[in-house]
Image: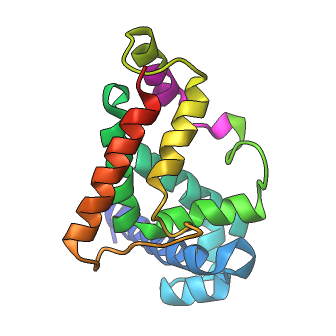
């Protein structure tokens, strides 16, 4: 087997581990996830998993930080239209409820207060700058950009898997989603208007 084939095979194994472990952590949390189930479902072994990720915490960190990157890349902020950004977040939570569950487990099991991630791992600098720029342009109300961002994200999660009231799913009627999108869009617009 060539080096290129070995590299491709190793990357395929690493990706299987990530895919299986994402589902495992989303369902069971950090404490409840079992490496034995991950390696069995990923068709690998503990030595391989530990070689890639170090330990269970390292595996969770890789998955969780990757999920934050996914949200940033799939749903980039448009601070000139925070209402649309909130709706696009709502849609992403419908497509990938596992990503919201990962963030919830991180909050419950790792960081019950303060920032969800270590300050060195933050990925919101560009979002905060975009909001500050929109504020300077008179498009978004004055206030702490972080607080505005947190409020818009919280509003977008009203029907997410972490809602205390109702968790929406993709298989619900399209008109239900459209009604929620309209309400979310209107509410965010009013909340962030100058």
Q: Would residue 59 be visible to someone looking at this image?
A: no
Residue 78 placement (x, y as % from top left):
33, 31
Count of numbered marks: 0
- Which corner quadrant of the image does residue 102 belong to? bottom right
Q: Is residue 30 left or right of residue 39?
A: right
Vertical side of 78 occupied by 4: above or below: below
Q: Is residue 129 left or right of residue 137?
A: right
- Which corner quadrant of the image does residue 171 belong to? bottom left
Vertical side of 164 occupied by 20: above or below: below
Q: Which residues are magenta?
A: 120-131
> Going 74% across and 64% down the picture, which residue do you hit?
108
The type of colouring in the image is rainbow
Q: Is residue 21 magenta?
A: no
Q: Is residue 1 left or right of residue 53?
A: left
Magenta-drawn stretch, dominant element (helix, strand or loop):
helix
- 3 and 116: which is toward the camera: 116
- 97 and 167: which is toward the camera: 167
> From the image, which quarter does the N terminus lie in?
bottom left
> Going 45% across and 69% down the picture, which residue do you hit?
97
- 63 and 54: which is toward the camera: 63
Q: Is residue 123 magenta?
A: yes
Vertical side of 192 occupied by 55: above or below: below
> From the image, which quarter does the C terminus lie in?
top left
> Going 66% across and 74% down the picture, which residue do you hit?
29
């Amino acid at each position: 087997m060539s080096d290129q084939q070995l590299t491709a095979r190793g990357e395929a194994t690493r990706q299987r581990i990530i895919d299986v472990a994402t589902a495992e952590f989303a369902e069971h949390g950090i404490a409840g996830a079992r490496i034995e189930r991950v390696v069995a479902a990923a068709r690998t072994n503990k030595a391989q998993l530990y070689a890639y990720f170090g330990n269970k915490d390292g595996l969770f960190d890789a998955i969780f930080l990757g999920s934050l990157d996914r949200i940033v890349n799939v749903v980039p902020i448009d601070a000139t239209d925070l209402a649309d950004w909130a709706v696009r977040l709502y849609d992403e939570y419908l497509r990938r409820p596992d990503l919201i569950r990962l963030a919830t487990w991180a909050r419950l099991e790792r960081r019950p207060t303060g920032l969800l991630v270590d300050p060195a791992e933050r990925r919101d600098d560009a979002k905060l700058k975009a909001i500050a720029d929109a504020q300077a342009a008179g498009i978004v109300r004055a206030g702490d950009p972080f607080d505005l961002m947190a409020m818009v994200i919280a509003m977008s999660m009203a029907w997410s898997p972490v809602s205390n009231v109702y968790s929406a799913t993709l298989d619900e009627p399209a008109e239900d989603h459209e009604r929620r999108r309209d309400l979310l869009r209107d509410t965010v617009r009013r909340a962030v208007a100058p």
